[in-house]
Amino acid sequence: MKESIEQLLVFALDHHASDIHFLKTRDDFSMKLRTIDGMLEIRQDRWGPAVLSYLKYIADFDLAAPKAPQSGSFSIEVRGEPIHCRLSVIHNQDKETAVLRLLSCQVDLKIEQLTSDPQAIAFMRSLCRLRQGLYLACGPTNSGKTTTIHAILHEIARANRQKIVSLEDPVEIADPLYLQLQINEQEGFGYEKGIEELMRHDPDILYIGEIRNAYCAKKLVNAALSGHMVVSTLHAGTIREAVIRLLDFGVEPFELAGILSGMFASRLYKKPDGSKECVYEIAERKEIFHIIQTKAYSPNHATLAQKIERALARHSIEDEQARVDLFDLQR
């Protein structure tokens, strides 16, 4: 069975997948891959329900409680390289759904490897030099935002002058240069409790994997107001949508204007050579202040739609998904 799992992971990695989705019913078993092109259904007869059962076993699930929602993780060697995986399973009536997240092992990823846009590279490098304020990345799943943040934090950590602590669910890119803590809801260590505990450890830079609710948003704002550099992500399509969502969480406009110092929205696409390229919408303090005041972009701001359009025009990306995103953003 171990060989079958390795073959499945090789298949997923060859398709540049970030997740494998499983759906098991009384009469059927299906799998899909999440790729930068969207969801890809796997039509096959090689892997069956036994694969999911084995994944639960190596992820150290409580097999005596098969109906309970569970999550776990494991590492497995594929093509001579370790692959870190996180499995989450939920039961609902006669259905069992599971997601296997394939976590990146590429720690020493440089900012220049993520994009060919010189303006975006300069912006990311400027974040590496700052030491206070709130910095946010936004975008959907598999948009490159987490990878970008880790590249920035890794560069800061290499200078070895700041204490960096992260709180993530899960830890997607393990980096030995700074302290990373993983959420464990079953043991009462969620984002809310974790933020309170981490602040007692006097970090210079605090990375919170995701702002999920109003309580978390206000805790991060307070941390930034106390002089820390705080970095986090938000599920929002664009910078403007992210600012509006923070305001909807109840964060006061004057607080955001005082501490929200930089933001980027990202999308991940294929390049002509088959590798990946991040396209970024970026905003510094002046633009963010304009959005807070008007709920709109300033006339000179380069929107995410414009950045995607320019990347397509200069052929730095060749991706049908980019054209779909462009259509959605322009509506």
Image (cartoon, rainbow, N blue to C red):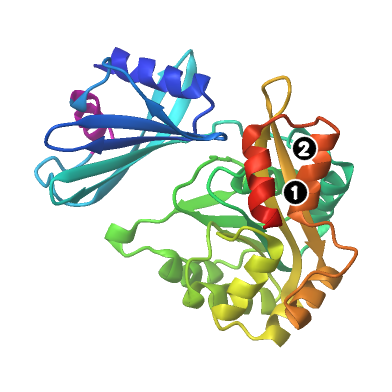
Q: Is residue 127 left or right of residue 15?
A: right
The boundaries of the magenta stretch are 50-60
Rendered position, 26 above or below 239: above
- The one nearer the camera, 75 or 17, is 17
Indicate the quadrant where residue 165 lies: bottom right
Do the numbered discs 2 and 1 sit on residues whose CB atoms are within 8 Å? yes
Q: What residue is drawn where x is 24% and y is 16%?
A: 1
Q: Amino acid at mark 2?
A: Thr
Q: Amino acid at mark 1?
A: Tyr
Task: Between residue 205 and residue 208, name the one nearer to us.
Answer: 208
Q: Secondary structure at mark 2?
A: loop
Q: Is residue 176 left or right of residue 204?
A: left
Quadrant hosting residue 42: top left
**Can you give x and y, in whole percent of width and height, for residue 78 in the image?**
44, 17
Taking 280 as reference, is 4 above or below it? above
Q: Which residue is mark 1?
A: 280
| Residue 253 visible at all | yes
